[in-house]
Amino acid sequence: MKQANLLATLFVGAAVASANAGSTPTFSYTITDANQAATSGDTLQFHGTISALGAGTWTILSALTSVDSPLVADDSWFVATYITPAVPLNNAVLSNVPLFSVYVPASTPTGNYTGTFSMFAGLNIIGTDGSNQVPFDIKVTHPTPPPTVPAPAALVSFGAGLFGAARRRRCQRAN
């Protein structure tokens, strides 16, 4: 009985290995929300899709986010979730993964800012076979301030002043 189970296990293992042997291993990722708009003080979240397909097991080895100054990038959540504890990916497609965030400081001038996100992955933890830089763009605008409308008390004071000036003038004419 043990010999039959061992043969069945070997047969299933060989069938899986031969099925994966013909598929070329590929690792890719995209940023699904690569073009975003912000105002000063905003923090933007960027998400993506990670694909690790074919024979073998992919492991994400490192990630790097760079962005134009004065914007500040933070990919610490991604690193803590997928790199620090190495997460093996085998024939997996992960959607809507939080990749990184970008903080727009209050002093940021209006304009277009760019950055790149790079991820390096190893197949069976040998070398960095899957890597590339994916660009992203941020358009920083400043909200138009609402038009200033005088307060009601200011209008009452102005009206009282006009009334007083007109009354004084009338009294001077009468004398």
Image (spheres, helix red, strand yellow):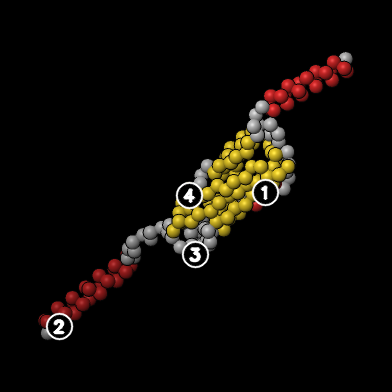
Who comes first in sequence, dot 2 or dot 4? 4
Task: Say left or right for 53 vs 6.
Answer: left
Instruction: Indicate the position of residue 134 as horizontal and vertical percent values.
Output: 55, 47
In three-dimensional space, the C-alpha distance between marks 3 and 2, rounded to whole angstroms, equals: 57 Å
Pointer 1 local density, CA inside 10 Å: few below 14, some 14–19, many at least 20: some
In three-dimensional space, the C-alpha distance between marks 3 and 4, rounded to whole angstroms, equals: 18 Å
Looking at the image, residue 157 lies above or below residue 112: below
Who comes first in sequence, dot 1 or dot 4? 4
Kindly identify the amino acid type of the residue bearing the numbered disc 2. Gln
Residue placed under numbered mark 1 in the picture:
62
Kindly identify the amino acid type of the residue bearing the numbered disc 4. Gln
Kindly identify the amino acid type of the residue bearing the numbered disc 1. Ser
Instruction: Indicate the position of residue 43 as horizontal and vertical percent values.
Output: 54, 54
Camera-nearest residue between 152 and 3: 3
Who comes first in sequence, dot 3 or dot 1? 1
Give the quarter of the image for residue 169.
bottom left
Pointer 2 local density, CA inside 10 Å: few below 14, some 14–19, many at least 20: few
Task: Say left or right for 7 vs 80.
Answer: right
Residue placed under numbered mark 3 in the picture:
107
Residue at point 76% right, 24% down?
Answer: 13
